[in-house]
Image (tube, grey):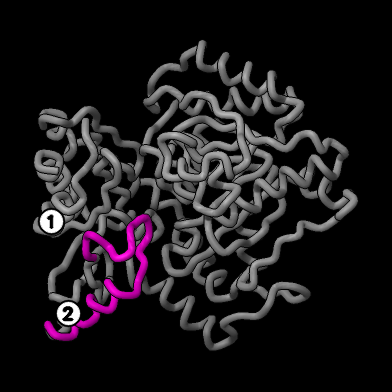
Amino acid sequence: MAPEPVIRRLLELDTRHVWHPYGPMPATVPPLLVEEAAGVRLRLADGRELVDGMSSWWAAIHGYRHPALDTALTEQITRMSHVMFGGLTHEPAITLASALVDITPAGLEHVFLCDSGSVSVEVALKMCLQYWRSVGRRGKRRMLTWRGGYHGDTFHPMSVCDPEGGMHALWRGVLPEQVFVPAPPSGFDTPVDPSYADTLVRAVREHADELAAVVVEPVVQGAGGMQFHNPEYLRVLREVTEECGVLLVFDEIATGFGRTGTLFAAEHAGVTPDVMCVGKALTGGYLTMAATLCTFEVAEGISRGEVPVLAHGPTFMGNPLASAVANASLGLLSDGTWREEVRRIERRLRDGLAAARDVPGVVDVRVLGAIGVVQLDHPVDMAVATEALTSRGVWLRPFRDLIYTMPPYVTSDSDIDLITDAMVATAGVA
């Protein structure tokens, strides 16, 4: 526990100099000062402990200070922390790329390692655009996606986020104009709506000559509203994109590595996209890293073009520390025990959040895998919600009209109950 003067001084400096994500400068809601993290708990500088129901924005799936991940970093740092990836390579990155090819949907053969999830989407869109230029179809330069999506905060990914309800409406008229169709009907188990499936098919066929790719978050629309949809719509997209000669991109940054109950959300549909993005939980939340995978056809098409290289090269691409901890994280997933943990969490979330359905102002409660969502009929009051949650020993980060959790897979039943009780109580006051 830090002395009060130290805490006060640090927070004063934070207010003066630190610009936090999705917030004004200076912040209107002061952040909480974290001193340590272990297991599923954050220890604040003032001595309080909070159960982290967010997995640090969905990344820390194994919790904090996991011995296997700590060991991987410690051992790697004794060999090398970083070397440039242009003209050089190293075992951790090679092992990681090979492992990703092995565990992702069949047909994704090539791996481009990136710095972050947003950059991996940037690379995916660049791949698609360059592929069509390389094969002589320069007119195919737009993307099609459905509303309610979120794909990151760098420039081109912002263009495939929802242009009205999303966070990037400010940039309308500046970003490339993409093709948008309505969001898919809500509900993982909701039967397929034939008329909506027809809408997808018609849109792709109508714009096929100008479409480079269809870009979607499979099964779960994350930061765009935590909506779930029937996987059958992914099969519809796969069939029509193949028919029309359009590439298909799955953004699995939020859904990858077990969050929805399968290792990747694409498995729910049994299809392989042409390009797939992964990130967040790739390193177990330890270091920033993501990857863009593609098929042989995409890579080969780019390689025989007028400019036969993918002109993208982050300075810290393939960082050995991040690669090593990513390999250790994948190793923890390799025995498959995470599946039962996610099923256990799903059952516990369903039971614990059921009471929220009777809370005034709650319009929906939904659970899929290790994701639990309470949706209100009004925007969440962030200051009120944060106080209500932290006073009950829980850390969550609501947004818009949603109070939601995506806890680490190692979260115990009692801690899941603590999270759900806090969510139900907060729904009644926020």
Direction front: furthest residue: 173
* Of labels 1 and 2, the one closer to you: 2
Q: Under tag 2, what secondary structure?
A: helix
- Report the amino acid beneath label 1: Glu
Q: Are marks 1 and 2 in contact (CB under 8 Å)?
A: no
Direction bottom: furthest residue: 78
The location of residue 252, given as percent across then percent down, is 52, 46
Quadrant into which the N terminus falls: bottom left
Where does label 2 land, which residue?
8
Occupied quadrant, residue 213: top right
Direction top: furthest residue: 195
- Report the amino acid beneath label 2: Arg
Where does label 1 land, which residue?
387
Q: Give the mark, 1 or 2, whose residue is nearer the N terminus.
A: 2
Q: Is residue 351 left or right of residue 335?
A: left
* Range shown magenta: 4-30
Residue found 61% across the figure and 34% down from its top: 178
Residue found 50% across the figure and 33% down from its top: 268
Occupied quadrant, residue 236: top right
Asked if the stretch drawn in magenta spans residue 19, the answer is yes
| Residue 119 appears anywhere in the view | yes
Mark 1 nearby-residue class (10 Å; few <14, some 14–19, many ≥20):
some
Q: Is residue 60 left or right of residue 111?
A: left
| Residue 103 appears anywhere in the view | no
Residue found 43% across the figure and 69% down from its top: 286
